[in-house]
Image (cartoon, helix red, strand yellow):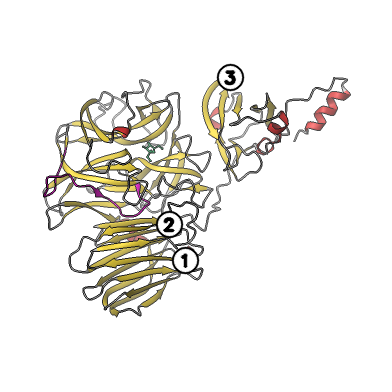
Amino acid sequence: MKRITDRITAALMAGASLIIPSSSLAADGVEVNHLGVNNTLVRVTGDSDFLILPVQESIDDARINVLVDGKIAETIYVRLAQSKTDYTVPFDISKYKGHNVILDIVAPHGRSSIREAKDAVCWEGIHLSDTFDSTDRETKYRPRYHHTPMHGWMNDPNGMFYKDGIWHLYYQHNPYGSKWQNMTWGHSTSSDLVNWKHHPLAIYPDGLGSIFSGSCVIDKENTAGMGKDALIALYTSAGTSQMQSLASSTDNGETFSVYPGNPIITLETEARDPNMFWNEETKEWNLVLAHALDHEMLFFSSPDLKNWTLQSAFGKGIGAQDGVWECPDLFRLPVDGTDSQKWVLLCNLNPGGPFGGSATQYFIGEFDGKKFTADTDADGKIPTKWMDFGKDHYATVSWSDAPDNRRTVIGWMSNWQYAADVPTSQYRSANTLPREMKLFTQPDGQIYLASVPSPELEKMRGKTVTSLSGKSVGKKGMSVTLPSANGGICEITASFDSKNASSVILTLANKSGDKVVMTYDPKKHTMDFDRRESGVVDFSENFPAVTVSPTFEQNGKVNLRIFIDRSSIELFGNDGKFVMTNLVFPHEPYSTLSIKTENGNARIESLKVYSINI
Ligand code: FRU
């Protein structure tokens, strides 16, 4: 370390007059020069892969222009630590090897003096390293079998595609902090949808803005002229305004080249999250774009993925309208497993969900390559349908090119109401479990979307810890112990017949007094999920909640699959006809499941608890 006092002493010994040097104490290979109260230059003089930046969660972002040989190569926003370091983030400088790298940093707020500027703890903390310590420091709450970013913030899943046995998942990512910022496509892959491998950042902000949500397709016929089987990504460039941009990859999505002709779609109003697919019937590409503030979706077609023609719009005044429309998806599915098919338009909405904040609504209908027409109900109205009846299921979209005609989706397991406040900091947010989409018809003729846990999830079942059948439960109820290993992660399957009971109450509890209460009401045909006393709930007034789902049955019989991870519960009911995805932050893992009725007896046909091998 060069000591600032050594430099002053040296200057005085050399007979120089005492001018306070603008430099601060800094690590080897890093030189810090203050240019005034709010502006500092950090020059990289050493040679390493990463510049490690100290972050303080509670302060505002500093704007950092990264100058490479004097030109702005990128701009990032980081909450550079002022009074204490909460955690550090790695800034990859390996790509600039052999060049002069200077970080031109503008502090977020007026500082009163240069002394205050120099006192910021980040200047001593910024250092070079060839490694970044990614050891998990969030073992209490980081999910074990859900995808999470290694560090930093995550929101929407993006651009998922399947190729050669590998499921690719990109995601909205801030690599430089645990709050939304610097939107970049992070990248992970999996061969089983359970174990995920992290890859380097895939697409990062450029002159047109940061990289918002989008989709990927494999261009099997080289329609875009970027190579046969090239992977084409379409995403929103979000600068001052939002526009749509294209990038291509010929190394299976590891790295992307940004199309020089970007942007390829511009509109006068806010539109984002392009979702495209090959339409086999019209032999054209189709694209759905969220016309966010107009609360509608726009439909485009294209022969070559670059030139898009606007064909129609759907949504004005239809369905839930109390928030911006975002992250669309459009796909066709067989109805009840027959040959008859329907189109499904997914339409994520924030706020305006049934329990506050973000949620996914959907419409069933027809699509002819140009126009989407929604089915109506008996009254001639287009009904609002929800895909999940929890608070933590958003931005759900599907994989392109999934095998065996599967329509596999994944969502962001959080809610914009409190995603940045949940009690984790090394990383923020997980994805939901992957789900298979099916359509089923109800007695009133309405078609609904079912979400069935992807079959891969059964492979992670470990020991059967509890197995019982044909048991009657009443008001006194019964209770079973849940596995304690691995932070209490487990899967519970249960089916019961409750014709003769007023309600069936399933409670997960621990010794700290935390509990999650799931109540089935056979008369109302509903399931309540109460997480008001589930553990740590006070980080946001919007977190403690009871969510309610229809159970889509008529006979008092319910089957459930409940997946418990370290900070989430996903309840799939009646073969996926209803789903409730809710985050929970228990003080310690839930250790018991009890089942009782309020009145009368229910018959437990089957109850199993599986530990999870991962
Ligand atoms: C949805 C969303 C998208 C946007 C992205 C930005 O959660 O608002 O509309 O592309 O997040 O991160």
Camera-nearest label, 2 or 3: 2
| Label 1 crowd bin: few (<14), some (14–19), many (20+), radius 10 Å | many
SS category of the residue bearing label 1: loop
> What amino acid is found at the position of numbered circle 2 in the picture?
Pro
Camera-nearest label, 3 or 1: 1
CB at disc 1 and ligand 1 closer than 8 Å: no
SS category of the residue bearing label 2: loop
- The image shows residue 98 at horizontal and vertical percentages of 59, 25
Q: To which quarter of the image does residue 302 belong?
A: top left
> What amino acid is found at the position of numbered circle 1 in the picture?
Asp
Residue at the image point whose x is 53% and y is 33% from the top = 77
Calculate the distance from the C-alpha at mark 3 to the C-alpha at mark 1. Answer: 56 Å
Q: To which quarter of the image does residue 51 belong?
A: top right
Residue 216, labelled with which disc? none
Please tell me which residue lies in front, 462 or 121. Answer: 121
Image position of 513 with respect to 291: above or below = below
SS category of the residue bearing label 3: loop
- The image shows residue 372 at horizontal and vertical percentages of 17, 37
> What amino acid is found at the position of numbered circle 3 in the picture?
Gly
| Label 3 crowd bin: few (<14), some (14–19), many (20+), radius 10 Å | few
CB at disc 2 and ligand 1 closer than 8 Å: no
